[in-house]
Image: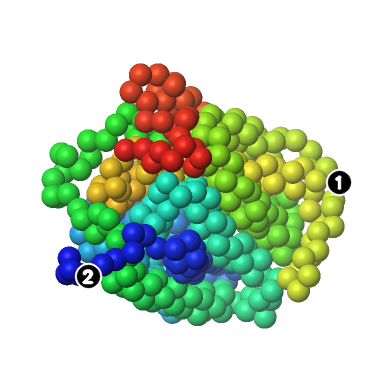
């Protein structure tokens, strides 16, 4: 600890804080690219390695199983050892995971790589989220979260579009995964730069209670408020809907709607692209007006009908979409509209949901609160990709039988309906006695919550 005789500036400058935001977001950029890099090669894994849809789903399920295991103690690790150490260690684990995934065509070795990725990637996200809450709470926190997600989702967007901008790599299943391993270096570089900035800040600035942590007791650690648990429940069903759909979307658009890989990748990329633009805007908006649970209700209402639209409505006229230096494709109008609307929902809910936790959970327990929330999220995400793959195989889904994909789409619709219920219950709780101020706290009030 720094000696009390050293006079410190009260808080870091805005430029310093926004620099921190950039570096931790770069750590998440590489992480997101690695996670999504396997979806564009689903068809190659199927044709070249004879993987079934169930096996493809397991590559996402095993990631979530690993995340569940590590997140049981991940929040305590982050609270105990600090964000700078945690972010660097977990970024290095992600790089190792990318290497293992790419190194062999054996299914179980590839599963091992995705398992290692789950060990590193989800705690990395929790550590970055905790760092942002520490640096921006009461200072346009939702905007900071939104910008962080924009940079992170640039990784997902780049992965979706990689069949276009990295076309030479897509002659086989392996080269795209080696590319992902190289991009993992961005995560490590961002983590190293954040380490340097926080180490400097610890010497120069008064960071308050950052680095202090409660004693690790399971009973006290997980005794959070009712509002917290409604947010957790919404988080589970929301991510169990959107992320598994994204995992299969390129493959689904190829098989069920006859799109080329480039066009399917562009279509799937519209989701993170919409989110990259809209998430910080929603974050800025909610910082100014509050109404956080109301925003979440609107986001889930928007999400609810989209999967049935994809399944049952006519695809519509083809629209030619061209992205310079990346690729082009003919995309059905209905699918284009659905993915843009899904992107808006994908922007609105996370921009409000994750910052809301910082107003409900004490700062000393934020790492634990975010870790528990992410752990519960991964429970749903472990089951759903496998379930969708199982249903696809069970109903013989494919180009000759596109109706076989309908049962999976009904699963996504059911999850979206649960999200609407939990967001309504959160709104009801936060507009009644004992509310935490989610509907009233704005960046203009100067109030920072609990």
Report the side of 73 relative to 25 (left or right): left
Report the side of 434 relative to 346 (left or right): left
**Can residue 21 be seen in the rendering of this structure?**
no
For label 1, the residue is: 317
Report the side of 132 relative to 365 (left or right): right
Q: Residue at x 75, y 35 (%)?
A: 313
For label 2, the residue is: 6
**Disc 1 to disc 2: CB gap under 8 Å:** no
Q: Position of residue 169 (x, y in %)?
A: 62, 79
Q: Residue at x 53, y 70 (%)?
A: 49
Query: Quarter-wise, where is residue 71 in the image?
Result: bottom left
Q: Could you say which is closer to the camera, residue 79 or residue 251?
A: 79
Report the side of 404 relative to 426 (left or right): right
**Can residue 199 be seen in the rendering of this structure?**
yes
Mark 1 residue element = loop
Determine the CA span between mark 1 and mark 2: 68 Å
Which numbered disc, 1 or 2, marks the residue that appears first in the sequence?
2
Q: 269 above or below 417?
A: below
Q: Could you say which is closer to the camera, residue 383 or residue 227?
A: 227
Q: Residue at x 59, y 31 (%)?
A: 298
Q: Position of residue 72 (x, y in %)?
A: 24, 51
Eye-nearest disc, 1 or 2: 2
Q: 135 above or below 195?
A: above
Badge number at residue 168: none
Q: Position of residue 102 (x, y in %)?
A: 46, 76
């Amino acid at each position: 600890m720094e000696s009390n005789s050293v006079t410190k500036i009260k808080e870091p400058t805005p430029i310093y804080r926004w620099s921190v935001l950039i570096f931790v977001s770069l750590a998440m950029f590489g992480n997101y690219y690695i996670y999504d890099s396997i979806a564009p090669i689903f068809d190659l894994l199927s044709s070249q390695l004879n993987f079934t849809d169930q096996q493809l789903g397991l590559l996402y399920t095993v990631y979530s199983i690993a995340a569940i295991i590590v997140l049981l103690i991940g929040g305590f690790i982050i609270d105990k050892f600090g964000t700078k150490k945690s972010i660097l260690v977990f970024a290095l684990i992600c790089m190792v995971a990318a290497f293992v995934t790419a190194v062999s065509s054996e299914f179980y070795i590839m599963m091992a790589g995705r398992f290692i990725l789950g060990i590193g990637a989800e705690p990395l996200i929790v550590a970055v989220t905790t760092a942002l809450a520490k640096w921006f709470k009461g200072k346009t926190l939702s905007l900071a979260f939104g910008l962080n997600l924009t940079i992170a989702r640039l990784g997902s967007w780049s992965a979706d579009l990689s069949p276009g901008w990295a076309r030479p790599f897509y002659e086989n299943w392996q080269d795209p995964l080696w590319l992902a391993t190289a991009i993992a270096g961005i995560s490590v570089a961002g983590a190293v730069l954040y380490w340097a900035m926080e180490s400097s800040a610890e010497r120069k600035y008064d960071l308050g209670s950052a680095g202090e942590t409660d004693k690790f007791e399971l009973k006290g650690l997980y005794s959070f408020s009712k509002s917290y648990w409604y947010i957790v429940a919404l988080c589970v069903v929301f991510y169990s809907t959107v992320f598994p759909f994204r995992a299969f979307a390129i493959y689904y658009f190829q098989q069920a709607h006859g799109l080329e890989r480039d066009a399917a990748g562009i279509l799937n990329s519209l989701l993170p692209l919409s989110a990259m633009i809209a998430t910080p805007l929603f974050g800025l908006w909610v910082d100014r007006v509050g109404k956080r649970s109301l925003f979440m209700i609107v986001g889930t209402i928007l999400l609810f009908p989209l999967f049935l639209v994809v399944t049952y409505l006519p695809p519509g006229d083809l629209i030619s979409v061209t992205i310079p230096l990346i690729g082009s494709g003919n995309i059905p109008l209905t699918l284009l509209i659905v993915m843009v609307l899904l992107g808006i929902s994908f922007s609105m809910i996370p921009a409000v949901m994750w910052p809301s936790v910082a107003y409900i959970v004490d700062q000393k327990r934020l790492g634990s609160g975010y870790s528990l929330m992410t752990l519960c999220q991964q429970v749903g995400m472990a089951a759903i990709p496998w379930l969708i793959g199982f249903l696809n195989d069970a109903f013989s889904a494919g180009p000759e039988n596109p109706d076989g994909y309908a049962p999976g789409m009904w699963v996504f619709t059911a999850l979206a309906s649960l999200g609407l219920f939990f967001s309504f219950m959160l709104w009801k709780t936060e507009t009644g006695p004992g509310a935490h101020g989610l509907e009233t706290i704005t960046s203009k009030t100067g109030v920072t919550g609990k």
